[in-house]
Amino acid sequence: MAKTKILYITHEMSPFLELSKISEITRELPQAMQEKGFEIRILMPRFGNINERRNRLHEVIRLSGMNIVVDNNDNPLIIKVASIPAARMQVYFLDNEEYFQRKHIFTDKEGKFFKDNDERAIFFCKGALETVKKLGWSPDVVHCHGWMTSLVPAYVKTAYKDDPTFKDTKIIYSLYADKFEHTLNERFADKAVIGNMDASALSSYDSADYYGLYRGALHYTDAIVLSEENIDEKLLNIVKNSEIPVTDCRNDAEFENYSNLYEQFSNEELETVA
């Protein structure tokens, strides 16, 4: 029987970037699943404070060279890769000089949200899916971590739904205690429309704030994972009203609940595990 293929998309991962609990989970979970026999790939942005020399990043020429259109502007996508020898894992980094080559991640030195965070998220989400297509690798499961991946579920289920790479792909979204008070550009949903998508497909994202991003993402998600304690109560209420299967992995040190969830996808027998 073929291995279940899992694609992890995240905006942070240890040891490259450590901002929150997300970096810990996305470092340990893929390795645990690989050791259990799953086939995995990992994608994240190459933010400017990720040291290329120390982490031994190098460009993957065969994957680079694409242009990602955001708000009618072409933006070159460079793909780099680094290895974690102890885990026998590779991590693919999406790079773009204009969007990612900065000393700070999401806010400037004064704590203000970057004005183009909306476009950075659009670029990353679309770029991630285009990179997977170019890899020629069809994931059974796409597991998203962090608000910056919030458009991935919508794209997979709409613009890419007939693409052979993602035709049968299921979406899992992990929730963390990552609430923020900032709001993306008011044209976020409008800018995020790609391909033959109808603007109404992204109406859930209209508020462009923390709740809007997750409300939109969960609208297209097949299963939700609770990955950390102290998740925002309002977000949990959105989850309760969504009727999406929920798996509680907050005390899952051995990642057994994650593994069982992936297996359920393989067997197409989703149910709530709480």
Image (cartoon, rainbow, N blue to C red):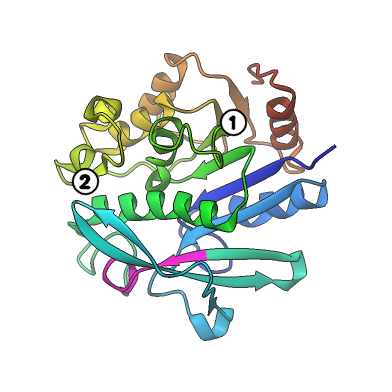
Q: Viewer-proximal residue, 54 or 91?
A: 91
Report x, y in % for residue 238.
39, 21
Locate residue 260: give its quadrant: top right
Q: Which corner quadrant holds the C terminus? A: top right
> In the rendered structure, which segment of residues is drawn in magenta?
93-102
Q: Is residue 71 above or below residue 176?
A: below
Q: Which corner quadrant holds the N terminus? A: top right
Q: Is residue 13 above or below residue 6?
A: below
Report x, y in % for residue 183.
21, 43
**In this view, the mark in front (1 or 2):** 1
Locate residue 180: give its quadrant: top left
Mark 2: few/some/many CA within 10 Å (<14, 14-19, 20+): many
Residue shown at the point (26%, 39%) measured from the top left: 193
Report x, y in % for residue 211.
31, 32
Residue shown at the point (73%, 55%) measured from the top left: 31
- Residue contact between numbered discs 1 and 2, judged by CB atoms under 8 Å: no
Residue 22 in view in this figure: no
Instruction: Report the amino acid beneath label 1.
Output: Asp
Which SS class for mark 1?
loop
Q: Is residue 100 magenta?
A: yes
Disc 1 marks which residue?
Answer: 168
Disc 2 marks which residue?
Answer: 184
Residue shown at the point (51%, 75%) measured from the top left: 61
Q: Is residue 250 above or below residue 184?
A: above
In the image: residue 67, left or right of residue 51: left
Instruction: Report the amino acid beneath label 2.
Output: Leu
